[in-house]
Image (cartoon, helix red, strand yellow):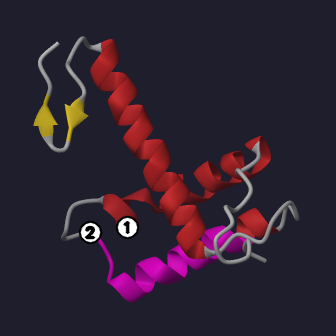
């Protein structure tokens, strides 16, 4: 189950992250694609629940759909930041580009 109130949940293991990526990539267009290809919020929630169920099969920790979605959003945000830095662009801070 999730950590008690006020405690952090354990970090995702490498196997959990791999399972997360394997679950999200086939559904990526439904979750993040153009508006005409996306599905309703309820259907997205069901997709995240199914992904969490796959992650839970590893037995490391009891992840919920919201945990998986938040971790995926963290991965996306960090990769976008790294890409910006590798291209020599300044990082965004509060939605405003910071001068180097």
Relative to 23, residue 56 above or below: below
Q: Say which quarter of the image contains residue 85.
A: top left
Q: Residue at x 71, y 51 (%)?
A: 12
Left or right: where 11 falls relative to 36:
right
- For label 2, count other residues whose C-alpha is less than 10 Å away and answer few (under 14), some (14-19) or many (20+): few
Magenta-drawn stretch contains 90: no
Tell me the distance, in whole angstroms, between the alpha carbons under discs 2 and 1.
6 Å
**Residue found at x 63% / y 51%:** 22
Residue 11 x %, y %: 71, 50
Which residue lies under the disc numbered 2? Answer: 37
Label 1 neighbourhood size at 10 Å, few (<14), some (14-19), many (20+)? some
31 or 94, which is in the foreground? 94
Left-right relation of 6 to 32: right
What is the secondary structure assignment of the residue under circle 1? helix
Query: For the C terminus, which image quadrant?
Result: top left
Q: Residue at x 43, y 77 (%)?
A: 44
**Secondary structure that dominates the magenta span:** helix
Query: Do tag 2 and tag 1 residues touch (Cβ < 8 Å)?
Result: yes
Residue 37 point in image, percent of width and height = 26, 69
Residue picked out by circle 1: 30
Name the residue furthest bottom. Answer: 42
* Magenta stretch in the rendered image: 38-53
Instruction: Please check the rendered image and state whether residue 52 is part of the magenta-colored stretch, yes or no.
Output: yes
Picture disc at residue 43: none
Q: Is residue 88 above or below residue 37?
A: above
Numbered disc total: 2
| Residue closest to the eye, 37 or 100 | 100
């Amino acid at each position: 189950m999730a950590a008690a109130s006020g405690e952090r949940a354990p970090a995702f293991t490498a196997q959990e992250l791999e399972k997360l990526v394997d679950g999200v990539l086939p559904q990526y267009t439904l979750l993040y694609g153009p508006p005409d290809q996306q599905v309703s919020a309820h259907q997205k929630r069901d997709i995240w629940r199914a992904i969490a169920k796959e992650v839970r099969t590893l037995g490391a920790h009891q992840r919920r759909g919201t945990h998986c979605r938040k971790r995926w959003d963290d991965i996306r945000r960090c990769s976008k930041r790294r890409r910006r830095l590798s291209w020599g662009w300044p990082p965004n801070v509060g939605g405003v580009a910071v001068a180097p």
